């Protein structure tokens, strides 16, 4: 009745994970081989900055120069090269690719409920599961240092994150696959940084965004609203350039589900702007479109964000090549998230690839100052749980759980790695500050 193919049993899959310990032992994940870098960190950054808007690159470097964590946010290509130089498990799943504490946040699900999850997928790709965990580990140490934690406290937060990841993955390995696919994390709202982000998201309504990003034309009450001019962060786009951005809505509409396409048809575009976003994305093209639906009190903001190839792509020769980097980002996000932005999609402007999503619709993020005291460890556990869910949805929890086993050696090794990589990040940050790329030395 069915094709004659081998179906791997749960026990076979678990044993497959166990055999991968021969490739890299769990206690050996504290290794870092900076001497294996084929080019300096600044050269790696320059390579991925080709094709970006030259006038904005200095701003990107200034943002990265503000702190070691700021540098880390923009240096995913450097860490991708460093991770690729290390032995890996070969156990693949969908990676967030830029797993750090500021890339989790609150947003509105399609049914209007506020959820908290990983929310940045610019670097998403299928790769070794531990790469996300190592980037998260380094980010927790850097966040801890920046929020005045002792090194032992920061490392404890990493171990709590990884232990929570391991425990959750073992639980997923015992659950029906359908339940894993729809598993909801309910308790995280009681964690103070998450609670604060949810409160911010509750206030970040489309009308709130309307007041923040637009003004009445000519300053006249009741006049049609236009985007503010807050250069270089926000600038109106007009003429031929605006027409090209609006024309990109057509291929975007074609990939939407019929019900989303109908909903979008109820809104008319009013104005277009160029917006600077993030740290790693500065220099890429990012547009916002302001729409009006059922009157002036019904605004909709869509972001059309340029997507470059994943920083990990050069190091994963067996990965499925992305024919469209906006589509790669969307599919990676949907693979890892239980609920995603209902307007998530992709388009193109000329030969450049773009992601489309809502801008600031009930979104709230974590700030490093929220990590004081016990909040760092509590938030680390949230990070571990959400990464475990994303990896279990897109990979095989039995194989990953088989590799992890029941001991603490993996979590302890990641704690050591987090400190080592944070140290290296600080050295690379100092090199950027000395390089002259940020103007006057700070």
Image (cartoon, rainbow, N blue to C red):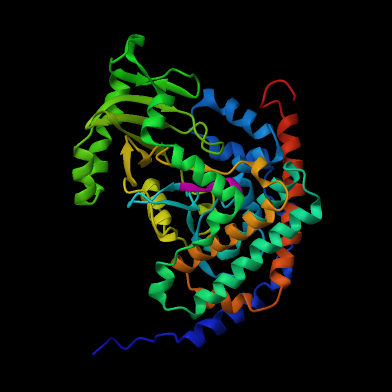
Query: Percent from the top left, x then y, of residue 233?
Result: 49, 24
- Residue nearest the observer in this picture, 46 or 212: 212
Q: Quadrant of the N terminus?
A: bottom left
Q: Quadrant of the C terminus?
A: top right
- Residue nearest the observer in this picture, 306 or 182: 182
- Report whether residue 196 is seen: yes
Residue at (19% x, 37% y) in the render:
266
Instruction: State yes or no: residue 148 in magenta.
Output: no
For this view, does 433 lie left or right of residue 399? right
Query: Percent from the top left, x then y, of residue 178?
Result: 38, 73
For this view, does 95 lie left or right of residue 295? right
- Report whether residue 122 is seen: no
Instruction: State yes or no: residue 105 in magenta.
Output: yes
User: Magenta span covers which residues?
Assistant: 101-106
Instruction: Examine the image and state in which quarter residue 224 appears.
Output: top left
Residue at (66% x, 68% y) in the render:
163
């Amino acid at each position: 009745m069915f094709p004659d193919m081998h179906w791997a049993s749960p026990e076979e899959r678990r044993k497959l994970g166990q055999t991968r310990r021969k490739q890299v032992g769990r206690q050996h994940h504290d290794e870092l081989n900076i001497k294996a870098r084929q080019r300096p960190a600044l050269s790696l950054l320059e390579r991925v900055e080709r094709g970006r808007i030259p006038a904005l690159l200095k701003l990107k470097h200034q943002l990265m120069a503000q702190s070691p964590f700021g540098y880390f946010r923009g240096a995913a290509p450097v860490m991708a090269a460093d991770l690729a130089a290390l032995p890996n498990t070969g156990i693949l799943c969908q990676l967030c690719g830029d797993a750090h504490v500021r890339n989790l946040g609150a947003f509105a699900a399609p049914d209007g409920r506020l959820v908290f999850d990983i929310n940045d997928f610019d670097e998403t790709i299928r790769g070794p599961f531990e790469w996300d965990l190592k980037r998260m580990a380094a980010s927790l140490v850097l966040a801890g240092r920046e929020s005045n934690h002792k090194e032992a406290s920061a490392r404890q937060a990493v171990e709590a994150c990884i232990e929570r990841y391991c425990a959750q993955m073992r639980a997923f390995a015992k659950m029906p696959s359908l339940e894993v696919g729809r598993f909801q994390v309910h308790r995280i709202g009681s964690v103070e940084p998450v609670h604060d982000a949810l409160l911010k998201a509750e206030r970040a309504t489309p009308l709130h965004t309307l007041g923040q990003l637009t003004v009445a034309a000519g300053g006249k009450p009741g006049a049609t609203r236009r985007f503010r001019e807050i250069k270089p962060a926000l600038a109106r786009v007009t003429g031929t350039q605006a027409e090209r951005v609006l024309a990109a809505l057509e291929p975007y509409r074609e990939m939407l589900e019929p019900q989303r396409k109908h909903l979008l048809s109820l809104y008319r575009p009013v104005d277009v702007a160029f917006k600077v976003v993030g740290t790693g994305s500065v220099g890429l093209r990012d547009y916002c479109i302001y729409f009006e639906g059922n009157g002036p009190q019904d605004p909709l903001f869509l972001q059309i964000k340029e997507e470059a190839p994943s920083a990990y792509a050069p190091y994963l020769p067996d990965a499925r090549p992305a024919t469209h980097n906006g589509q790669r980002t969307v599919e990676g996000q949907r693979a890892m998230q239980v609920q995603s932005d209902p307007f998530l999609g992709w388009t193109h402007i000329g030969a450049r690839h773009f992601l489309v999503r809502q801008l600031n619709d009930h979104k709230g993020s974590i700030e490093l100052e929220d990590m004081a005291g016990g909040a760092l460890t509590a938030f680390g556990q949230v990070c571990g749980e959400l990464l475990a869910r994303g990896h279990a949805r897109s990979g095989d929890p039995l194989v990953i759980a088989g590799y992890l086993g029941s001991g603490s050696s993996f979590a302890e090794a990641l704690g050591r790695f987090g400190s080592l990589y944070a140290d290296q990040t600080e050295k690379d940050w100092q090199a950027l500050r000395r390089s002259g790329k940020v103007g006057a030395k700070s």
